[in-house]
Image (tube, helix red, strand yellow):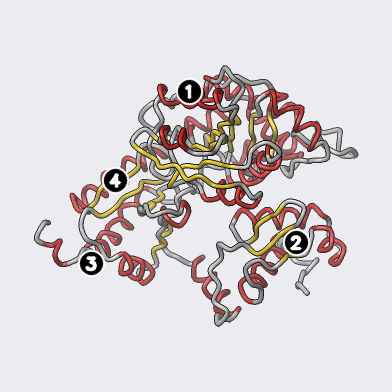
Amino acid sequence: MYSLDFNSKIPLYIQLYEEIKKDILSNLKVGDKIPSVRSIANDYKISKTTVENTYSQLFAEGYIDSKPQSGYFVSDSINFDMNIKVEEIIESKNKNNSYKYNFYPVQLPKNAFPTKIWKRLSSKAVEEIDTFGTYPNGQGEYGLREQITKYLINSRGASCHAEQIIITSGFSESIALLAKMVNYKYKSFAIEDPGYHVARKVFESYDYHIDKINVNENGLNLSELEESSSKIVYITPSNQYPKGVVMPISNRLKLLDWANRVDGLILEDDYDSELAYYNRPIPCIQGLDKYDRVVYFGTFSKSFSPAIRISYMILPNHLLPIYEKCFDSFFSKASLPTQKTLELFMKEGHFEKHIRKIRSLNKKKHELLKTLLKSYLGDTMKIEAQGAGLAILINPKYDFDWDKLKYLAEENSIKLYFAKDVSGGSWNAIRLGFGGFSENELEIVIKIFSDIWFQCLKKDSDMIL
């Protein structure tokens, strides 16, 4: 039995998440079935929404997989050590939360959120909502969808209307909805290699065959895609995840032509297009689409706040009847007050002002980090990805002791992140997130990092320096 404290200030779904995760790590095996949403809700006298939020988080973090018509199972991506005690797991978790310097690669500045404006609009939103006694629009609040439509047309060159937009509580929910929606037609799925592991895991959970397509200097290798068996492809063309390359217009048009010829779909994840620091982003593929072949995924997590849990997708018109028929009982997990507040925030022009502010703040820190890396590490490193997003990716130019780097980072209370951990494959890089640091902190931590770095260069490399 799981221990839930109904009097605690910690939300029930977080308590349940921690309990199930502890059970997975200490007691269960790969492939073990997890109790259904209904049974957990009934056994513990809690709402199905609470359980669904818990399972969504466990799924997003790779602890569980979902199989159609079968339920939830412990994911095979978890590395189990049955000799590890629960106390050791908890101790490790606490240690991970106590790093002095954390290079988390998708963190926004602590003081960047417009708290005063959001508070004011939250009160206004609650006053304006007159539908608390009814179920909300399953597709998301129409007013918010209208605002997103206007924003995407103006900022990303999209071509869409509000009826095409589905509001969700995160990318994993969006991609899972899409995978279920087209499972009747497509059985093979192509993804960039290296690429985003959440998209791959979702499609694997619905028994799609996975074709990994290499990434070159122009993004997805179109020749390899042509030779694959897949007719549906997931891409991050404006800032390839994790390599950072941009797909040129010519390749975007070729990709659209491919999708039209094979009766396929392009899943365009435009996850951080607002955070491009040097050039205006190339218009999204969805806006170039004359064949109704693109599903567009967007989020407010990277440019605004990951805490509000609002993402969205644009469905091509030919998928709308399928969505309406198969998902008429679907309800967005994004809360109604949050949706309404965001709608007002965008309608009054605050969102675009916020984007300009956040882009300016992060551009300064991006430039500073790049300068510091060149100053302290010199020609011992190469920058793999920069110019957009909330991190710079680097690699050593010479023989390097990676295990020693991880050990010394831990000893110096520095949390590092690696591309291979979130994209699979053989390609790796150190992901140095700058969003959570002040400018003063950046210089301090890069100096410490450089001391560690040079200890990890192998002796034969010293002659080259």
Mark before the other along the chain sequence, 2 or 1: 2
The percent position of residue 389, horizontal first and vertical second, equals 43, 40
The percent position of residue 236, horizontal first and vertical second, equals 48, 37
- Residue type marked 3: Gln
Distance, label 1 to label 3, CA atoms, is 44 Å
Distance, label 2 to label 4, CA atoms, is 43 Å
> Which residue extends farthest right?
133
Task: Give the quadrant of residue 341.
Answer: top right
Compare residues 261 and 63 and report the one nearer the observer: 261
Quadrant of the rendering where the C terminus is positioned: bottom left
Mark 1 neighbour class, 10 Å CA radius: few under 14, some 14 to 19, many 20 or more:
some
Q: Is residue 199 above or below residue 4?
A: above
Compare residues 301 and 57 and report the one nearer the observer: 57
Residue 129 appears in the rendering: yes
Please name which of the two marks, 2 or 4, marks the residue nearer to the observer: 4
Q: Do tag 1 and tag 3 residues touch (Cβ < 8 Å)?
A: no
Q: Do tag 2 and tag 3 residues touch (Cβ < 8 Å)?
A: no
SS under mark 2: helix
Name the residue carrying label 2.
12
Q: Is residue 61 above or below residue 223?
A: below
Name the residue carrying label 1.
283
Quadrant of the rendering where the N terminus is positioned: bottom right
Name the residue carrying label 3.
455
Distance, label 4 to label 1, CA atoms, is 25 Å
Name the residue carrying label 4.
383
Please name which of the two marks, 2 or 1, marks the residue nearer to the observer: 1
